[in-house]
Amino acid sequence: MVISRLKKGALCTGLLVLFAASTAVATSVKIINATPMEVKSYILTNRALRHPNSTVSLIPNYGSSLQMGSSSYETIVFKSAKKLRVGLFGEASVKTNRDTYFSISTPLNRVGVEVSYFESTELYNPNKGKFDDQITSTDESEKIILNKIKLHFDGGYTNGYTLSHEKGKKGYPIEKIEPHSPAEKAGLKVGDIVVKINGQKVNFNKDINTFNTSNNIDKKELETVTIISDSGVEKDIVMESAYWNPKTGMFE
């Protein structure tokens, strides 16, 4: 999979105002085995791709004449609110807007679908003395989200387990394990508490809706998952990722 970079522009429609960022860029990925409508439907229905309690707006056909090499261009915007502590000592709380953007474009040759994604939040800008939109997603967090879409349609290498976004007392519980996956074969179970992956402490960042760790879906990798027992004893479980085929819905 080739990760390309796509410049963010200014989008305005009604009360939707997106900031212009001439030097900012968004990560994008090319989906081969799906139509634009299928990708759009998946993004709209997969709640793991957006923040809870968000509302959706669609901006159809934006940039069809500006997006070089594309015959169509549509943007999906998920809008949500975020509480932000302000004041010298964080003594006050204000609500700010948080937006998640997915852009779907179709190449002129009609081969594949290009999807880009980024997050922005209204944050206080001390240089301007006011709140304005600022990019909050990172290259890595953007790649993690886009890989979920790529994996669903085109397949790739994964370990087949899903962590809860809600942290327990000691770590993050596994809430789902795919049948015949490397995770299942390695002995992981639903309810196991994960504290580290490849030696790195696991953390879910709610602001950008992703964990701080990810796997490479383009090739096989060894992964060490550290789980912790009720008594506090840690145990390392090593597994090698396997190819998940979306056509069969099975690991190969």
Image: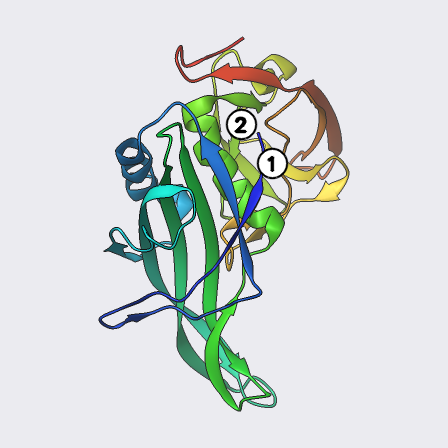
121 up-or-down from 42: above or below? below
Depth check: give the residue in front, 189 or 233.
189
Q: Is residue 238 left or right of residue 2?
A: right
Depth check: give the residue in front, 94 or 57.
57
Q: Which residue is mark 2?
A: 161
Crowding around mark 1 (Cα neighbors within 10 Å: few <14, some 14 to 19, many 20+) is many
157 up-or-down from 233: above or below? above
Name the amino acid, label 2. Tyr
Residue depicted at x 59% and y 27%: 217
Residue depicted at x 45% and y 46%: 116
Estimate the x, y position of residue 203 in percent, counting from the top left.
62, 49
Sequence-wise, which precedes: disc 2 or disc 1?
Answer: 2
In the picture, the quarter occupied by the N terminus is top right
Label 2 or label 1, whichever lies nearer to me, is 2
Q: Residue furthest right?
A: 199
Depth check: give the residue in front, 11 or 167.
11
Name the amino acid, label 1. Ile
Q: Secondary structure at mark 1?
A: strand
Q: Which residue is mark 1?
A: 193
Estimate the x, y position of residue 230 in percent, counting from the top left.
64, 37
Estimate the x, y position of residue 121 in percent, counting from the top left.
46, 68
Q: Secondary structure at mark 2?
A: strand
Mark 2 to mark 1: distance in Å? 12 Å
User: What is the quadrant of residue 231 in the picture?
Assistant: top right
Estimate the x, y position of residue 180 in percent, counting from the top left.
52, 11
Crowding around mark 2 (Cα neighbors within 10 Å: few <14, some 14 to 19, many 20+) is some
Residue 169 visible in rendering? no
Check the image and tell me how it is coloured: rainbow
User: What is the quadrant of residue 3 in the picture?
Assistant: top right
In the picture, the quarter occupied by the C terminus is top right
Residue depicted at x 62% and y 37%: 214
User: What is the quadrant of residue 31 in the picture?
Assistant: top left
